[in-house]
Amino acid sequence: MKKSFSVLLAAALVVSLMSGCSSANTQSTTLASTAATTADSTATAITVKTDATATTAKPANTPTLAYICKDLSQEWFVGTSGSMLETAKGRGAKDVIMLDCAMSPDKYMTALDNAISQKVDVLIVCIPDQKLSQITIDRCKEAGIKVMAEDDGLIDANGVHLAPSLELDAYKVGQSIGDYLGKYVIDNKVNADPATTGYICMTMSEVSSCVPRSTGAVDSFKALVPAFPDDKIIKADYDGTTDKGFNVVAATITANPDIKTWIVTAPNDEGAQGATRALEQAGKDKSAIVIGVGGYLAKDEFKKDFSCFKATAYIDPILDGQIAANAAMDWIEKGTVPYSDYIKDGEEFGVYPFNATMVDASNYKEVMGASAN
């Protein structure tokens, strides 16, 4: 079968290791091995294979990993992939092949065939559409390739995990966002006129790891501000990109001309950034508050004299990449199935519960350390 391949060349990814993070952000990695990392930033070139039919002979004990990412243009995944590569190579891997599917299910399937044809030892997947989970498992099993999920789990129709996965503790992250938002609304008397105040809850309904972020935010916000009208909470679905985030928020603002004050939560920084630009364009930003998840885009908003992008749930992409790479290498070298310590009763695979810390202009430098620059 003739195959066409779409591969993103990512050259010179600069990876800055965290220094000076607060204890609230520090996570204790229980994996048996840790990466060999350096204290100062290094530029790392990512090698990407462009011919899926050509397999490279690997010397003994030099495994090759592959990472299929749903969007390598997003800053979160740039940091994660660079850290993943550095960590794996530090432990003796020959390469981590980076494959970008740019949010396209078709490109994802091409990338999957690419990785399988190159006979990688472990495939790490951040899938653009979780409906492709079972076919991913089936093809990897047929090829004898170990597969694990990163950020968005490989799940069946009932939400059961089909492979080990590293994911945010999504609902808990959402609760942190809702707590921050509720306190902000109370302290700043944002809801003084409920008839002219609206809450845009941005979500990605097709991504299981994102929906609980939105749900948790609303639940915690309503617990603190129970009088906020339910009919003023508006769901805005998007695909995780800044452009689509801008479009859905701009459309929501236009459809609700009586709303003068907007509060917005988004499950990633891209959505929050898009919402911020939409509010600015509509002249609604001065009284608004926007909260995201990530930190990689929020930090630039915090440096401005004014931005309605007020806070974010900071997650560390460097640590994320380290955990995933270490788990993959342990699987190869020791036969340790990733995240087995987190297997729940009745489930076959564990899910590592990555966490986040709320940051704003007052504390982001302290919490994010070098990543705040």
Image (cartoon, rainbow, N blue to C red):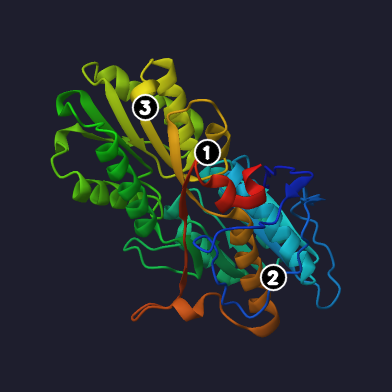
On-image quarter of the C terminus: top right
Q: Confirm whether residue 214 shows in the render.
A: no
Amino acid under disc 3: Val
Relative vertical location of residue 283 with respect to residue 39 in this rendering, above or below: above
Q: Secondary structure at mark 2?
A: loop
Amino acid under disc 1: Ala
Amino acid under disc 2: Asp
Residue 292 position, x and y percent, is 44, 41
Q: Secondary structure at mark 3?
A: helix
* Residue at x 65% of width, y 64% of height: 322
Residue 305 position, x and y percent, is 53, 25
Q: Earlier in the sequence, mark 1 or mark 2?
A: 2
Q: Earlier in the sequence, mark 2 or mark 3?
A: 2
- The residue closer to the viewer here, 353 or 146, is 353
Q: Is residue 215 left or right of residue 334?
A: left
Q: Which mark is residue 249?
A: 3
Label 3, label 1: how many angstroms apart (C-alpha)?
18 Å
Q: Which residue is mark 1?
A: 298
Q: Which residue is mark 2?
A: 121
Q: Earlier in the sequence, mark 3 or mark 1?
A: 3
Q: Are marks 1 and 2 in contact (CB under 8 Å)?
A: no
Label 1, label 2: how many angstroms apart (C-alpha)?
36 Å
Circle 2 or circle 3, nearest the eye: 3
Q: Is residue 286 left or right of residue 150?
A: left
Residue 161 position, x and y percent, is 42, 68
Of all residues, the one furthest to the bottom in this rendering is: 334
Residue 143 position, x and y percent, is 63, 69
Circle 1 or circle 2, nearest the eye: 1
